[in-house]
Image: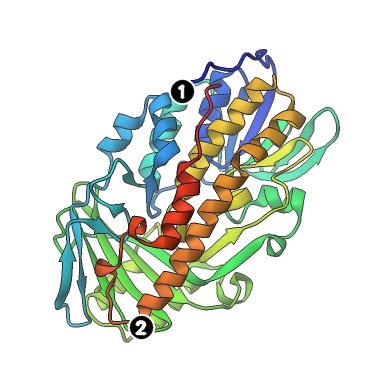
Amino acid sequence: MSTPMESTCPEGKSVLISGASIGGPTLAYWLNRYGFNVTVVERAAGLRPGGQAIDVRGPALEVAERMGVLDAIRRRSTDLRGMSVVDGDGTELSRTTEHTVSGGVIDSPDVEILRDDLARILFTAGGSEIEYLFDDSIATLEQDDDEVRVGFRSGTARAFDLVIGADGVHSHTRRLVFGAEEDHLRHLGSYLGVWSAPNHLGLDRWEVLYRMRSSVLWGAMVMSVRDNTEARVFVGIESDQPPARFLPRDITEQKRLVARAYADAGWEMPRLLKEMWDAPDFHLDAVAQIHMDSWSHGRVALLGDAGYCASPASGQGTTMAMAAAYVLAGELRAAAGDHHTAFATYERELRGFVSANQEIALITRARMRQQQTAELDLSEARPRDEDEDYARVLAKVNAFRLKDY
């Protein structure tokens, strides 16, 4: 390991982070450790429940270990043993204990975990010195050479030295500082829905893929979670229409959209759709990427999906967010809080890593489209390390190394 960088403690430097999912709490942990005064604002009333299963891989495992939370993350893993593929009649077409669609190769150091479980672990690790403002959000931002003046939705106003937007692919922080979402979002042609349901299939650390031979519908994937006490349901819809035209704002209307799309589907879909209506954590969104020429402007910077979302198709969003949070905090420490230097180095360190992860998503989408109407089912698809295109890009991803700050 390299020698940690020397730095001057940025005493009194205040940072506002927007977003309390994965990147935000990770950044808050490291900034607090380095002596910054940290505030996190989250528009939800508390840590948001639900969300899909996500993967902690590569450098994110190292970040978690340095935070002392890796064991806790492993204890909360989905711990899947394998997957099966079924048709519309429920007939099992194939099964494997080597990999799953959601988590990849089972016998690997990677950890698959529910998003809300990981968010709580990271939040708890930060401790009581980090200020959290729940049920609030940034309404206005004004900055000059000395500070960022923030007006909150609650009506209060405060000034900070720096503001970091870690508020997701539809980042309001990005919109306020960098302009309309449409200028940065690249839709990849599909929509992903997820919700919680009872484990009425009796799955035991198992994932079932209902595959539909359709150019529009993916079918469904159901996996047992939390020691088989619950299940998560995933569905996909293909559409090149941009989110502004395809996706209703109202959640009830989004559920109607999914129900209409899958009205004639077989297997367990009628029951799963019925359970969707009562699911409090239903989420439907575009599979999309964010591309930006710069991740910072003045005293405001973006982190994770807000600045460079690779989409769920990459399987790398969590890893990118945790690794980037560690790098951003470290560069601010190394620069003694000088944001000009820190933001530039942060971007220079991560651009290649981010680009490679975004390319993974594009390869995945191309493979999915090939498989949707092909006879080959997903359980028989070649692992990533046996696919030449994947291997080429994964070599770039795996070349990334964390510094010691």
Q: Residues within 10 Å of mark 2 (few under 14, many from 20)?
A: few
Residue that sits furthest to the bottom in the current view: 264
Among the 4 quarters of the image, the one containing residue 381: bottom left
**Residue 248 horizontal/vertical position (percent):** 56, 72
Task: Confirm whether residue 160 shows in the render.
Answer: no
**Residue 133 horizontal/vertical position (percent):** 57, 35
**Above or below, comparing residue 98 to residue 277 in the picture:** above
**Residue 357 horizontal/vertical position (percent):** 51, 52
Residue that sits furthest to the right in the current view: 145
- What is the distance, in whole Å, between disc 2 and disc 1 at their CAs? 50 Å
**Above or below, comparing residue 312 to residue 21 in the picture:** below
Q: At 29% from the left edge and 30% from the top edge, which residue is drawn?
A: 71
Instruction: Give the left or right position of residue 369, taking residue 135 as reference.
Output: left
For label 1, the residue is: 127
Q: Please tell me the numbered disc located at residue 75.
A: none
**Residue 328 horizontal/vertical position (percent):** 61, 33
- Front residue of 34/226: it is 34
**Above or below, comparing residue 138 to residue 191 in the picture:** above
Query: Given the image, on which type of amino acid does mark 1 rest?
Result: Gly
- Front residue of 150/25: it is 25
In primary-sequence order, the first of circles 2 and 1 is 1
Task: Confirm whether residue 281 shows in the render.
Answer: yes
Q: Quadrant of the C terminus?
A: top right
Instruction: Give the left or right position of residue 106, taking residue 405 as reference.
Output: left
Secondary element at tag 2? loop
Query: Given the image, on which type of amino acid does mark 2 rest?
Result: Thr
For label 2, the residue is: 373
- State which mark lies toward you, 2 or 1: 2
Q: At 46% from the left edge and 21% from the top edge, which residue is drawn?
A: 1
